[in-house]
Amino acid sequence: MVEQTCEILRERIRTGQLPPGSRLRQEELAAELGISRTPLREAMRLLAADGLVELLPHRGAVVTALRHDDRVAFWEARLALEPAAARLGAARRAPVGLEGMRAAISEQRSVDAADQGFSANRAFHLALVASAGNPLLSRFADALWVRTVGAAIYAAQTVDGAVVAAYADAHAAILSAVELGEADVAERLTRAHILASPVPPTAPI
């Protein structure tokens, strides 16, 4: 019950149903989810451990507000994780990752709303990591992309049709390199794609 409650709240935070700074009223949530407050409090503690929720004196649980440092940390973590995963993916080419990347690109080419664009974008990057065939790397990527910071960054990029199409083209090039087993190219293209993000690091990488 604790894990199920945690996943429900995690998804609401990821999608923005529970925006940064919003208070999680335990009594209301417990009634809505049909659970007691004990598993709800435990779920709050797990979310706090993941950095998604802050447990504040006199205010209770609040969805973590996004700061510039959070955006930088997200950018840096992706830069460390995804190019290396792309290199490994080109060596292993796990089918679930390749299929996921193809599906995400196809979705990107047909979306007409920013939230759909973010969902497809997120799906591609998680599938890219999955192509490495390493469950620990996928777990890291899942924890990283669950934060609403990714959606906030995406929304800040003036995501019109041309931008989404450009993302799909960049993703298609990365997928091609992974499928062909071109590890150097896959790593280089993934790094360049992340470096094109409008959120700069505070220090040189």
Image (tube, helix red, strand yellow):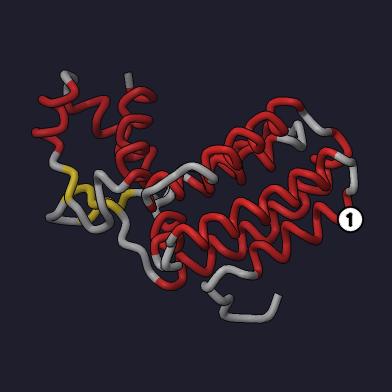
Q: Looking at this view, is 92 or 80 the one in front?
A: 92
Q: Residue furthest bottom?
A: 203
x and y, in percent, of residue 38 in the image: 22, 26
Q: Quadrant of the C terminus?
A: bottom right
Vertical order, 73 against 150 (above or below): below
Q: Residue at x 56, y 80 (%)?
A: 202
Q: Residue at x 80, y 55 (%)?
A: 187
x and y, in percent, of residue 64 in the image: 32, 56
- Whether residue 49 appears in this view of the structure is no
x and y, in percent, of residue 120 in the image: 51, 43
Vertical order, 21 against 204 (above or below): above
Which quadrant of the structure image shows residue 99?
top right
Which kind of residue does numbered mark 1 sit on?
Answer: Asp
Vertical order, 123 against 82 (above or below): above
Element type where label 1 sits in the image: helix
Q: Does residue 26 appear left or right of residue 54 in this picture?
A: left
Q: Quadrant of the N terminus?
A: top left
Q: Looking at this view, is 141 or 192 the one in front?
A: 192
Q: Residue at x 53, y 45 (%)?
A: 108
- Whether residue 93 appears in this view of the structure is yes
Q: Kindly identify which residue carries mark 1.
A: 184
Query: How would you rate the neighbour count of disc 1 (Cα within 10 Å): few for under 14, some for 14-19, many for 20 or more?
Result: some
x and y, in percent, of residue 191 in the image: 73, 62
Q: Does residue 123 appear left or right of residue 112 in this picture?
A: right
